[in-house]
Image (cartoon, rainbow, N blue to C red):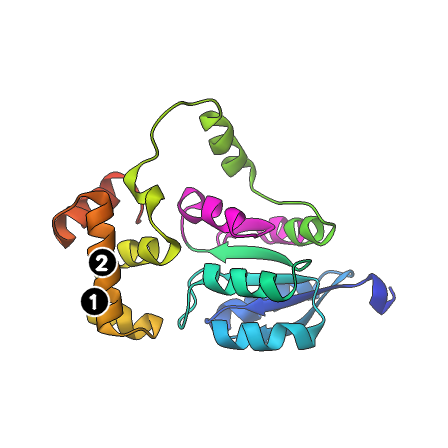
Amino acid sequence: MSDKALIKVFIADDHAIVREGLKQILADTRDIVVAGEAENGLDAIKLFRKSGCHVMLLDISMPDRSGIEVLKQVKKDKPELAVLMLSMHREDQYAIRSLKAGAAGYLTKQSAPKELVTAIRQVAGGLKYISAALAQELANHVGEDHEAPPHETLSDREYQTLTMIASGKTVGAIAKELSLSVKTVSEYRARLLAKMKLKNSAELTHYAIKNQLIE
């Protein structure tokens, strides 16, 4: 197969073992080649252009900035790039946010290798990709006339802060993981509590568990 016919993929994930696993899966295909990789969001933004990639596999939970932030930036730099989001989170938590931000598809990391290859080929061809389970979930809500739950009113960063607090992380730990100041994370926390009309982190955690926002 000629180089022009190959689908060039860029992998952005902070876990080396995940990147190696993805490369191994794609090594067994004839039409897909890994053209570059990055272990954090900043490197992904810097390096993806040099790779000449057609598809980016992007982890939604990057250490220095959220995957959705990276998604928005790379789509701004190269609108035609197909970005396939990968996540450990349940599909209904982040999939809609990702698609609205410009992603071409969304897969959980538990997906079978065959599904990953199918998704890459589909988004490389200019189509969207979501799993059958998510398609069914979306279909179930078509036509429903109900008010959006409070967590859907949050910004992407506020939502990320919510899930991290509900998972038991302190403001200091979140600040370190996201490369933000403690003051900034505290502001996100205060803002999301106000939007959701919650009093403290305990109520926030209870809400997250009740609405299955965390595992």
Q: Secondary structure at mark 1?
A: helix
Residue 211 x/y as whole percent: 28, 39
Check residue 155 for magenta coloring: no
Q: Amino acid at mark 1?
A: Val
The answer to whether residue 140 shows anywhere in this view is: yes
Q: CA distance from mark 1 to mark 2?
A: 8 Å
Residue 188 x/y as whole percent: 26, 60
Whichever of callouts 1 and 2 sits on the residue coming sooner in the sequence is: 1
Q: Are marks 1 and 2 in contact (CB under 8 Å)?
A: yes
Quick check: 28 left or right of 23? right
Query: 183 and 9: which one is in front?
Result: 183
Label placed on residue 189: 2
Query: 87 and 70: which one is in front?
Result: 70
The answer to whether residue 166 shows anywhere in this view is: no
Measuring 27% from the left and 71% from the top, which residue is drawn there?
175
Residue 42 x/y as whole percent: 49, 75
Query: 157 and 132: which one is in front?
Result: 157
Check residue 105 for magenta coloring: yes
Residue 64 x/y as whole percent: 40, 73
Q: Which residue is mark 1?
A: 171
Q: Amino acid at mark 2?
A: Arg
Mark 1 crowd level (few <14, some 14–19, many ≥20, 10 Å Cα): many
Measuring 29% from the left and 58% from the top, which residue is drawn there?
161
